Image (spheres, rainbow, N blue to C red):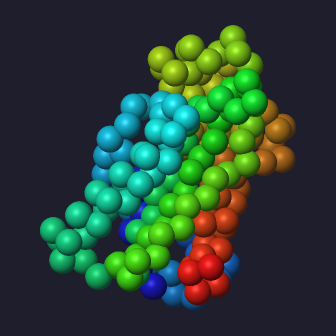
Amino acid sequence: MKILIATENIVKVEACQAAFETYFENVKVEAVHVPSEVGEMPLNDEIGEGTKNRIKNLKKYAQENHLQVDYYVAVESGINNYFKSWMITSVAGIENDSGLASYSTSPSYPIPGEYVEEIIRDGLGVVMDRIFADDDSGHHKGGIGFLTHGKITRRSLIQESFMMALIRVINDNW
């Protein structure tokens, strides 16, 4: 099974690989950077739009390069405002060429209002790296790893969002 993922971030690639290997054998994930066509730190509905745009751009890439692909996947993280509280959420998407499209989210986690403008301006990774004195949290355990004292990692959070999106795949387009 060949999966094309819209990122070169190793944490996201590993999360995708692990999620698919939960249900399938012989999974090969190929990483390709394609644009999200949304801001660097997507807000609210832009998170899902970024995921959908990445998948659209993956399909275009595959067609232009004559690639045989079973599933196109992407995950976009951003900041949203639910219940008058700012949160970080990831949206994972899985599509194929037969009309299947499945999207899901990770669990969301709250961020203090005092960091919202800085996160929107500079990006979550930059702010988390500054707060937790890390040099690349986005490619390691992530901010969630720091906030949960290592109990939940960025990889596990993203893997969970892919697992939820796989529900339609493993249940015949449920």
Horizontal and vertical percent for residue 168? 60, 76
Viewer can see residue 136: no
**10 vs 117: above or below:** below
- Quadrant where the N terminus sits is bottom left
Q: What is the quadrant of residue 60 in the picture? A: bottom left
**125 vs 168: above or below:** above
Residue at 62% x, 18% y: name it.
116
Viewer can see residue 6: yes
Q: What is the quadrant of residue 129 in the picture? A: top right
**20 vs 133: above or below:** below
Question: Which residue is situated farthest in the top direction here?
Answer: 114
- Quadrant where the C terminus sits is bottom right
Residue at 47% x, 17% y: name it.
121
Horizontal and vertical percent for residue 24? 59, 85
Q: Nearer the viewer, residue 47 or 18?
A: 47
Q: Nearer the viewer, residue 38 or 68?
A: 38
Question: Which residue is situated farthest in the left direction here?
Answer: 64
Horizontal and vertical percent for residue 82? 70, 33
Horizontal and vertical percent for residue 50? 42, 46
25 to the left or right of 99: right
The number of numbered badges drawn on the structure is 0
Residue at 74% x, 25% y: name it.
85
Residue at 31% x, 46% y: name it.
35
